[in-house]
Each structure stands twice: as structure tokens, then as C-alpha cells.
Amino acid sequence: MKQTLLPFDNLPFTPDPKQVIYVESNYDETVNAGLEADIKNLNRQLTCRFGLTLGYIPDMMKRMRQSLFIRYQAPYRPYMLPRMNQEIDSSMILRYLASGDADSIGPGLLAFGRQCGDTTWYLYYPLSSASDVIPACEQYTQWLIEKQREGVTDGNSIDSTLASSRTEGTDPETGFDKSVERMMADIREKIEMLRARGVGEMVLQSLLLPEVKLSRMRITEDYRILLIDYGNMEIKMTPLVKTVYFLFLNHPEGINLKEMFQFEGELCAIYRQVTGTAQLTAKMQASIRRLTDTWYDNSIHEKCARIHQTFLLKFDDRLAHYYYISGNWGEPKRILLSRDLVEWE
């Protein structure tokens, strides 16, 4: 199968190296019929054999018009399905072809090659039928293996050594990202189908023009968390996790995890309010103390990760990251949401 390297300039999406994209300048009935009939099986094979997914725009269109997808991507308008745009098809990406005749591109697959500034290079594999998808991906995988060997020869191995697991007495910063990663692993499969990756970003933009519309947050008298502009969506947390969340809401400037011991009194006060408990038991006090002992206990990391997970199960990260606790290494961790959007009853 002939392999051609094609340059694309200023693509309106972040290329996903694990996604191959079906393209064509003119609709090919035979290839499309085969892809539509076998898209689920093809994706299963691509994932199992090559770790790839197939970016097939007609299938993306169907999925993105499902109400569950819309609620996840745009919770501020959960009942509005996007209009079908006749210009959204498998030729869209060819508008960004930097050189060559886009109209001459027949049905085929684009597989990520490399990124050079604003130019993305894709390998193009022509298809005569849907059955050519697997052989094309086999050829692409072989190309990747060869490139990796070249990288190793040049001293540029793609392998990296993972950081060791946290041990007692280590910097509290170490556990923050790892706890989030572990928690995300538990929900990744649940939210993967609700996300738009690679060329899906371009399709989503064309369908929704997804502005970032943040919701006001209302904390009720009984300490429920409601997102008013997302249909009064309730964000449910256990009392201890909610206590951590309210602590960070109270401190828009952020909190350095190494200084959590300074907030033990405030955590106790918040926990008493959230639970309606006048006097904390020894077990409750121990749970609070674990949150502040950040050099020897991962409790605060686990609670922050749980908050991260809770919001990502509700809506996409382009919105969710304003609501959960985040921060760069060594910097105070904070909730980005403007406190002008937070209402306490």
C-alpha cells in the first residue's frame, strides 16, 4: 500500500497520535457503506491490535447528537441538540492541506506523523474498501516501530522511567498528581465516550461552537452544592470530601499543601457545620488530622482527586477544571472559579 506524507497547516484541533482519520475529497459510497456497517468492530480491532481509534466523522456526528453527549459537553444547554451542518463531512480536514491538490485526495486514512510548529504531517494511506483499514494500520505501526528504532539509535529513546512510588516523609507535592491519576483510571472508561479527541474537537466546534459558560454555584443552608445554570445540577460529596472542598472555596488565594497543618482548626469547624455535629468524636478528629499531616499521609491527595473525579463525571474538563482543586507543582492549590459566581445561603 502506497504511503504519502501530507502537510496540514493550523489545524483547528489538537492532533491525537492514537487516532487515524478517515478522509475523502468526494463521497465514496462503497467505502462509507463498509465503514458504517463495521465501525464498532473496526474500532475494537484497532484498539486491541494497535492501540488506535478510527476518527470517522459521520459516526462522530451521530454520537455527538445524543443528548447524553450534549449534557456532558454543554451542561448549560442540555436540551438543545445541535443542527446538522451539511459542511461537516470527511473532507473537512482537507481544507487545511498545506500543499497539493485537496480535490484529488481519494478515500483514505490519515495517521499522525510529526508536528513542526503550526504544521502537522500526516501519513496518508489510500483505501479501496473498508477492509483496507487494518492493513493500513499494520503498515503505519511498522513505520512507527522503524522510527522508534531510529530514535533509539540517535540516543533519543521514547521510553522514560516512571517516578517511584511515594514513601513516608516525602514531599506532599509528589502525591497530588499521582492520586489524581489513580482516581482518573477508575472513571476513564466512563467518560472516554463523552469526550471529543483529535479530529472530534473540530467536529464538536462546528456543531456546538462550544463557548465556556460557567455556572453559578449555590451552597444551600444544608450545604448541598448546586450549579444553578446547569439545570440546578447537584454535586454530591461525602462530608469529609465536602469539608476539603469548602476549605479551598474559602481560600481563593490557594493553599500550599505543605502548610495544611495550619488549617486543622478551620477544617474541624467546617466539618462540624457540614455534618451538624456539635462535638467531634476522636475518630472524626483523627480523620481531620490525617488531612493536615501531608508529609506522611495521602488523605488530602485522595480527597482532592475525588473532587476532581466528581466534576469530570458531570461535564467536560474545559468546564470542570474551573471547579476542582488544581495547581502546578510547588504552587498553592486552588479552585479557579471566580468567587463572584459562588453564593452561600
Image (spheres, grey):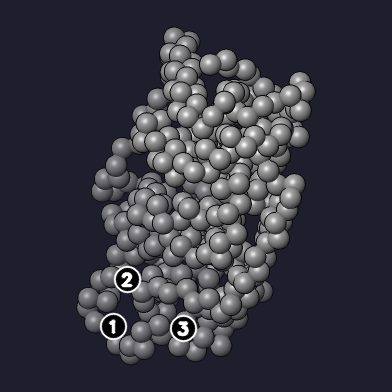
Q: Amino acid at mark 1?
A: Leu
Tell me if residue 34 comes above or below residue 308 in the rendering. Answer: above
Q: Is residue 182 left or right of residue 71?
A: left
Earlier residue among tags 3 and 1: 3
Q: CA distance from mark 2 to mark 3?
A: 18 Å
Q: Position of residue 145 (x, y in %)?
A: 43, 18
Under tag 3, what secondary structure? loop
Circle nearer the viewer, 3 or 1: 3
Residue pictured at 58% horizontal, 34% vertical: 30
Give the labeled residue for mark 3.
Answer: 223
Q: Is residue 325 left or right of residue 81?
A: left
Name the one closer to the observer, 57 or 332.
Answer: 57
Q: Which mark is residue 280?
A: 1
Does the CB distance between marks 1 and 2 fall below 8 Å? yes
Tell me if residue 204 comes above or below residue 309 in the rendering. Answer: above
Under tag 2, what secondary structure? helix
Earlier residue among tags 1 and 2: 1
Q: Position of residue 307 (x, y in %)?
A: 43, 64
- The local crowd at label 3, few if under 14, some if 14 to 19, many if 20 or more residues have their Cα within 10 Å, is some
Give the labeled residue for mark 2.
Answer: 288
* Residue 129 visible to the viewer: yes
